[in-house]
Amino acid sequence: MDERSNPPAAAAGTITIGGTRTVNRLGFGGMRLTGEGVWGPPRDRDAVLAVLWRAVELGVNCIDTADSYGPEVSEELIAAALAPYPDDLVVATKGGFVRPGPGQWKPNGRPQHLRSACEGSLRRLRLERIPLYQLHTVDQAVPIEESVGALVELREEGKIDLIGLSNVDEAQLKRSQKLTEVASVQNRWNLADRAGEAVLERCEREGIAFIPWFPLAAGDLAKPGGAAAEVAEAHAATPAQVALAWLLARSPVVLPIPGTASVEHLEENVAAARLRLDAAELGRLSAA
């Protein structure tokens, strides 16, 4: 099958983020492009660049990253591999964390920090305007209205296009919506962790793109005898592919962004867009 005319990532259909940016409904997450602990450069820079090139070849046209991945490393690699970007590629990034060291994440939602973070992302990504800029987390020391208000100002200045949120609950989403249209929500959600269901349901009702991070997790369901393992065996697939297929089938607003530093793993992930689970299989996975 010709990947150029029928790219695998397009098999799950498309979603229009914020009413303006239409992308294939299987994206790519840039966290794993860095070193261990999401810190420093990758062991093999050329291999990571190859993953990014291959992702675009496979039809991935939404790539998500953050200034804190590395920090700065993921954004720089994405630009090195793909800038100037294809016209249909949406590069999404985030600000709101600072990194004291490997494995350490400290929220900073102060407006001045978010402004500096956004301007740094613009430079590293070699963009004049960021298609989707997301508040990476809520800083409990800063009212979310102040953090989101800073993003609104950046949009008014032409530095970002669409505004998204990450790691928010339903109340925080509602408060943010009083200030601006929210184009996307990026929360942890997968077969093994469905605590954010209420936020997903609100996004579904309102047409907000829901971007689940850590999408491949299936927990005990992936172990021998588990629902994901048995469904995978029936399709000659992997439990991770089943986990992605379940996410894609759950709602048309879901936009998974599995990440990897391996071309082989990337191709396996993208192939999940073509995996079709029947109603009984979906019901079994949902009930597990």
Image (tube, helix red, strand yellow):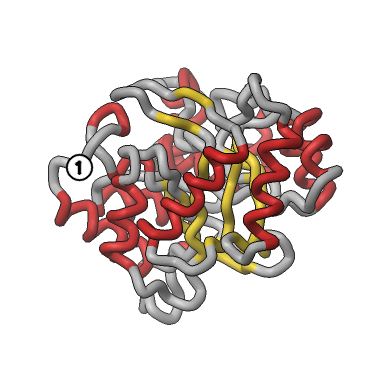
Locate residue 206, reporting x and y percent: 82, 50
Seen from this angle, which residue lies furthest bottom?
5
Which sits in the foreground, 219 or 253?
253
On screen, residue 204 versus residue 36, left or right, reads right
Seen from this angle, which residue lies furthest front?
112
Q: How many marks?
A: 1
Location of the N terminus (image quadrant): bottom left
Q: Quadrant of residue 6?
A: bottom left
Locate residue 233, reporting x and y percent: 41, 37
Residue at x-position 64% and y-position 26%: 194
Locate residue 18, reporting x and y percent: 71, 60
Which sits in the foreground, 241 or 150?
150
Q: Amino acid at mark 1?
A: Pro
Which sits in the foreground, 143 or 84?
143
Which sits in the foreground, 13 or 155?
155
In this rendering, does residue 174 appear at all? yes
Q: Quadrant of residue 34?
A: top left
Location of the C terminus (image quadrant): top right
On screen, residue 203 versus residue 222, left or right, reads right
Residue at x-position 22% and y-position 60%: 50
Residue wearing tag 1: 42
- Relative to 170, say whether 73 is above or below: below
Mark 1 residue crowding within 10 angstroms, few (<14) / some (14–19) / many (20+) = many
Locate residue 31, reporting x and y percent: 37, 41
- Relative to 38, say whether 63 is above or below: below
- Relative to 199, say whether 141 is above or below: above
In this rendering, does residue 209 appear at all? no
On screen, residue 143 versus residue 190, left or right, reads right
Q: Secondary structure at mark 1?
A: loop
